[in-house]
């Protein structure tokens, strides 16, 4: 099976936003700053600068929901390799990813898992669990091709 797509800067922003919401680290940060926020609510009347306790939570949320995706989108616009047309060829033995600069061949064992989101598939590398490749679902020419891809991936990798 083969499919091709042209990544867009918004793809990188959307994927980054989705990944942020899936990492425990970000939820821990939000919970921690949430506790400081609640403490700040109690301190408003007792300390002249108690309102400063209210700042970390909204700043953390803005950082995760706005700044990080915007940074990835900006980086994609500035990096021709990130915006290059991607071609994937997948079969039972391997995944071949091509763009104008390179070709990468990987056995399915090199991937740890696949995460299916509403608009994307994310493929995580086994050797570095924070590195992934994304495939927008718009890359598929038909619902049947998408279903065939989903079925192949589910046979080869854990899909979450």
Image: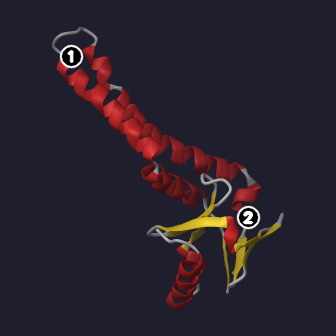
Say which mark, if any, is on residue 84. 2
Q: Image quarter for residue 50? A: top left
Percent across and percent down for residue 145 are 57, 88
Percent across and percent down for residue 60 are 41, 35
Taking the view exactly as shown, the residue that stands out farthest to the left is 45
How packed mark 2 is, by other alpha carbons closer than 10 Å (few <14, some 14-19, many 20 or more), is some
Mark 2 residue element: loop
Q: Is residue 157 above or below residue 152?
A: above
Which residue is rendered at x = 37% and y = 38% of the image? Answer: 30
How packed mark 1 is, by other alpha carbons closer than 10 Å (few <14, some 14-19, many 20 or more), is some
Mark 1 residue element: helix
Q: In which quarter of the image is the N terminus?
A: bottom right
Q: Image quarter for residue 129? A: bottom right
| Lateral position of residue 8 relative to residue 19, left or right | right
Residue placed under numbered mark 1 in the picture: 43
Q: In this view, does 149 lie above or below 42?
A: below
The residue closer to the viewer here, 148 or 12, is 148
Percent across and percent down for residue 23 are 46, 49
Percent across and percent down for residue 58 are 35, 34
Which residue is rendered at x = 47% and y = 52% of the image? Answer: 17
Q: Earlier in the sequence, mark 2 or mark 1?
A: 1
Q: Is residue 103 above or below residue 66?
A: below
Residue 30 seen: yes
């Amino acid at each position: 099976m083969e499919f091709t797509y042209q990544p867009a800067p918004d793809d990188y922003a959307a994927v980054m936003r989705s990944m942020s919401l899936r990492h425990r680290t970000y939820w821990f940060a939000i919970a921690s700053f949430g506790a400081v926020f609640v403490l700040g609510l109690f301190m408003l009347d007792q300390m002249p600068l108690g309102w400063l306790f209210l700042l970390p939570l909204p700043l953390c949320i803005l950082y995760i929901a706005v700044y990080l995706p915007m940074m990835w989108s900006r980086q994609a616009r500035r990096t021709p390799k990130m915006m290059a047309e991607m071609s994937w060829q997948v079969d039972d033995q391997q995944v071949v990813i091509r763009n104008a600069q390179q070709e990468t061949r990987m056995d399915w064992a090199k991937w740890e898992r696949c995460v299916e989101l509403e608009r994307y598939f994310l493929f995580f590398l086994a050797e570095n669990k924070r590195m992934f490749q994304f495939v927008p679902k718009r890359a598929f020419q038909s619902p049947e091709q998408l279903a065939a891809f989903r079925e192949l991936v589910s046979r080869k990798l854990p899909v979450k």
